[in-house]
Amino acid sequence: MSGYVAKIGHHMNREVDSFLQAYPSVAMIEALITDCNGVARGKLIPRSKIQSVLKDGLKLPKSALGLDIWGRDIPALAHANGDIDGYCLAVEESLKPTMTKRGIDQGQLIMTMVNEDGSPYLGDPRQILSRLVSEFRRRGLTPCMAVELEFSLLPDPGRDRPLREALKEHDTLGGNLYALDELDRHGDMLDELREAFKIQDLPYEGIIKESAPAQFEINMAHSDDVLTLADQIIRMQRGIRTVATRHGLIASFMPKPMDNEAGNGMHVHCSLLQKDGSNVFNNDSEQGSPTLGNAIAGCLALMPESMLIFAPSFNAYRRFQAGNHAPTVPTWGYDNRTTALRVPAGPPMAKRIEHRVAGADANPYLVLAAVLAGILHGVDTELSPPNPIDGNAWDMEHEVDDLPCLMEVAISRFEKSTLLAQYLSADFQTLFAYTKRQELSEFQRRVTDFEIESYLRG
């Protein structure tokens, strides 16, 4: 194993030397790996130790990538194999500066996990996405993707008051959609955020006020380097939370923080490029190529059993309500925002799928992987899509079943899927299902305030 890690480290030595020379004020470096919930795990490494990290990697238990949302082990998984270690390796060209309240005095390094023999550990979401990208490359295709990130920007009530207090100020009618005044109100915070993105060279394309109170959306530039794009989403989310905190705010990616308001989503745009850079979804028609139809059909076919990836939390299922800006049925349409898959209007060369299912709290590596798995399935098997939807998809009767609207149903569909075991990995399928069952059990045994208000006097 040590020889394998040393080889990886050798390729990064020049990169790290240049970084340390450019940023002499950097004292600590955050070595970051993302668990199945999209939570950043890892260690803070002193500047003097970074070369040894490149040479030897970092050892973390494999179970660290399969923790529940509260950061607890899954005993059935962690204890079964003695809680063995994996090896976290640095991703090339991923060392970036970060801006703290003191200035640029910290670095950030993306890690990925391998087994002792150097093979990819397929419980690591980044390795799962890498595997899907490789499958497309073997077919002479390159995915080109972009993401829209929605989040809520709320006043922090402080540690001595309930978090629900953050929502009261915004429990009003209407969210002032596209209002520039709302952006002006947070101008100082957004200026600092833009500077933080610039320092990390993140593909920021602007921000808008979204439909729910306190809801905003950041657009990212499209990229044909999907692994780096997922890394950038993690960096952006981490940066948004950090900068918001410095301004007395909570930046929340909770999918459904407010009653009767739209939730926070993570919309994914995807096209496929051939080796000459041409888009295989384009055949110079308004409808798009047959391959586009195959890809749509594959995404629809895998959507119900992938729902646990798109909606990984108990709260995420509250977002799927008719008329609430989230799809409830696996449907598609041209320039139709009521469907699960939308083919946006635009020039034929930009023909793409917009996948509108995932909540903002979903792991971006896994979301992109699940979208690509659907596309790959449809293209490889030449599936044919149903007819596109015209009009309001929420008000129509459909020949297909609704998407799973309960976490328990989504877990069951996910863990029984032979296709997801094939495209993502059976090991990950087991890990993720166990993790989500532990979380669901915690919610099922809790009694909410609303239940007490409704039934206690009855």
Image (cartoon, rainbow, N blue to C red):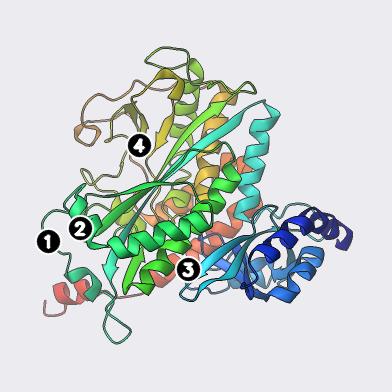
Looking at the rendering, which quadrant does residue 195 occupy?
Answer: bottom left
**Label 1: element kind:** loop
**Which is more toward the observer, 411 or 347?**
347
Q: Mark 4 packing: few (<14 Cα in 10 Å), some, or many (20+)?
A: many
User: What residue lies at 70% left-to-right and 30% top-to-bottom?
Assistant: 138
N-terminal label among 2 and 1: 1
Residue contact at pointers 2 and 1, CB within 8 angstroms: yes
- Compute the Cα span from label 1 to label 4: 28 Å
Name the outermost residue toward the bottom. Answer: 160
* Nearest-to-viewer mark from 1 and 4: 1
Report if residue 34 is visible in the image: no
The kind of residue on which mark 3 rests is: Ile
Q: Which mark is residue 340?
A: 4
Residue 165 position within the rendered picture, expressed as x and y whole percent measured from the top left: 22, 76
* Nearest-to-viewer mark from 2 and 3: 2
N-terminal label among 1 and 4: 1
Residue 178 position within the rendered picture, expressed as x and y whole percent measured from the top left: 21, 46
Q: Is residue 226 left or right of residue 172?
A: right
Q: Which mark is residue 290?
A: none
Label 1: which residue?
172
**Label 3: element kind:** loop
The kind of residue on which mark 2 rests is: Pro
In which quadrant of the rendered image does the C terminus lie? bottom left
**Which is more toward the observer, 420 or 222?**
222
- Compute the Cα span from label 4 to label 3: 26 Å
Label 3: which residue?
69
Label 2: which residue?
213
- Compute the Cα span from label 2 to label 3: 26 Å
Residue contact at pointers 4 and 3, CB within 8 angstroms: no
User: What residue lies at 39% left-to-right and 54% top-to-bottom?
Assistant: 360
User: What residue lies at 43% left-to-right and 33% top-to-bottom?
Assistant: 300
